[in-house]
Image (tube, rainbow, N blue to C red):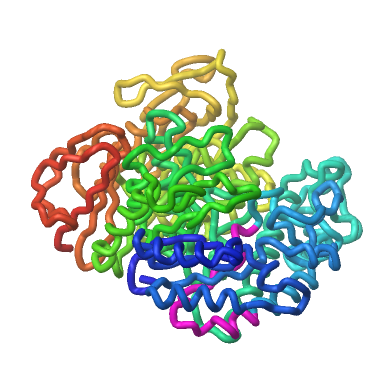
Amino acid sequence: MLGGHLLHGGDYNPEQWLDCPEILEEDIRLMKEAGVNCVTLGVFSWAVLEPEEGVYDFDWLERIIENLGKEGIQVILATPSGAMPHWLTQKYPEVMQVQADGRRNLPGKRHNFCYTSPVMREKITALDRALSKRFGRKENVILWHLSNELAGNFGDGACHCELCQSAFREWLKERYGTLEELNRAWWGRFWSHVYTDWEQIHSPAPHGEYTMTALTVDWRRFVTEQISGFCTMERRAVAEYSDLPATTNFMDTFKNLDYNRLQKELDIISWDNYPFWHREKDEVPVAAWSAANHSMMRSFQKKPFLLMESAPSVINWRNNNPLKRPGMHMLSCMQALAHGADSVQYFQWRKGRGSYEKFHGAVLDHKNGSDTRTFRDVSEVGARLPGLSSLLDGTVNRPKAAILFDWENWWAVEDTTGPRLDFCYPDWVMEHYRAFWEQGIEADFVDMNADLSGYRLVSAPLNYMYRAGWAEKVRDFVSGGGIFVTTCFSGEVDDTDLCFTGHHPLEDVLGIAPEEIDAPSEEFENSFTYSGKDYPAHTLCAVVRAKEGTELLASYEKDFYAGCPAVTKHAYGSGEAYFLAAASGIAFLRAFYKDVFAEAGLENALGAELPYGVTVTERMGKERVVFVMNFRNEPVCVDGIGTWTDAETGEACADRLQLAAFQCRVLTKQAD
């Protein structure tokens, strides 16, 4: 556990208040009152750390770090590459990104730098080294925070300048070797798009080529490599005088950057969590989405992660920004811990007086000091976390199920033209995850490079692209006794978006032969019956033939493909594979996965039927630590839980557990 305890705090921006020493004094006093033990410094401080080229001013930062240290508050120190000072962009305009249409950005915003630019790399490396030399061995500095939300917030995170074009062509040469192989992989003879010179290749552009999915996916792969390389450069710079671990803050299901690739450059995963609580009265869809993202962050390295940012109150960028209802702040913080976080941190400590985020929620508002509901909510979290630190130290979730979430598959399926143009890959995956979450079955998220051993169940919704080796990996997994679930429009193309020919790559495992796929309008919605109940079949409906030995669990009931398989099960080796030919909805997925979980021998940590809105997770260590969370704004009761102890009150809990509205209870039992 980093720092020896659960971290509680968040982004602190004292450079905005250097002319107000009384505010800086008040900050530390109130941090102690709120139970804050760690803050992040320097994320957007470049203009103050280096007010003119080559002139560093670190004295103010040293005073802040030392004053925090005197009060036992630890520091996560950032490299400030997320936002460039105006002296840099004025003198070196080439550091700013060029958009896909060829326009170079004007100064401003953030994440506006070219990851390939030698000038940008030189300037930030020099600053990072200087920060490392000055602060890398400070007693209360515990972690490097590299840049901020890489490739995020404004634009698509990519730079299309000539330097990047040249680097892209070199990357393609290394990947394909020859133009002949590239043209084959990209199917270049279509529309006479045969490249005869590497210089003819350009990144996808609205006024140029953007219809070739292989190009767009390779461009995204290249951008990920450039950004990962930039991150590695910063990591090496701060490591010159420091042996501290390094992280960078990820974001939600973020399309621009393959986090499975970037995570390899980091010691610790961290992320920024801003769910849309109270979008509607039913909090379950948002709770499941937030849980999925926490689980994804844990899954990258199969170890605890850090919640780097969250909102202690409102955020400021949606059309409407509701306040957190009473109880939701504590519950959302506990949800992070439940899925493997070792911290609860906020953006930000104190609201700024001006500019873009002046109304973004913070621990301290513009008025009223500590006398606010938000401050009291944060203080309650700060008081609760120390009692959980020793309990959670050395623990992490160890699911026996996994769900495929693969960035390259995401890029490819959303770029393809047909059978639909409105695919949202994360929505497909998260709907399946929600069926797990509602029944308290934990799952890791994996990509197609992952090791599947140790899992009993792997689900791969909308697995359009099969990357090299994936079919063989699934075949071995099922043959060895695993259960595999996949859906329509899966196994269509290889990793350069070339369609498979002859037969489906997993036809022998799935026991089906796909023929056609229908994308019906609402007027042609189909249906099927599963376990005696009727369910809709919509959005995509694959028309497949069942092979000998394949069990039909449901068939279409309407239209010309009535009687064709809608849900199948096929034994292969010691395992089984399920194929869902049609999209249906959460009602069907609940029923379907309940049967699959039973088949796989999976049950939630309580072994109980969970009321709607209640879920459980388990962090495993010397003791079994189970979080029971109620995301309904009303009391509920969970029956049939067995015998547990409330970790925080010592109360014995047998058979029945009462939960108040938006409550999380932490239970323990000696591990087997």
Report the quarter where the C terminus lies: bottom left
Classify residue 116 as left or right of residue 391. Answer: right
Q: Is residue 417 magenta?
A: no
Q: Magenta part of the protein: which range? A: 129-150
150, above or below 435, in the image: below
How far from the left and from the top, in percent, is residue 288?
40, 41
- Is 379 in front, or is 430? 379
Count of numbered tags? 0
**Residue under the image location 72 percent in, 63 percent down:** 84
Report the quarter where the N terminus lies: bottom left
**Residue under the image location 76 percent in, 79 percent down:** 54
Classify residue 493 as left or right of residue 106. Answer: left
- Is 531 in front, or is 503? 531
> Residue 549's image quarter?
top left
- Is 486 in front, or is 63? 63
> Residue 631's image quarter?
top left
131, above or below 622, in the image: below
- Is 588 in front, or is 611? 611
**Residue under the image location 19 percent in, 42 percent down:** 608
**Residue under the image location 83 percent in, 58 percent down:** 161
How far from the left and from the top, in percent, is residue 178?
81, 64
Residue 219: tell me if it is visible: no
How far from the left and from the top, in percent, is residue 660?
22, 39
How far from the left and from the top, in percent, is residue 290?
43, 45
Residue 464: tell me if it is visible: yes
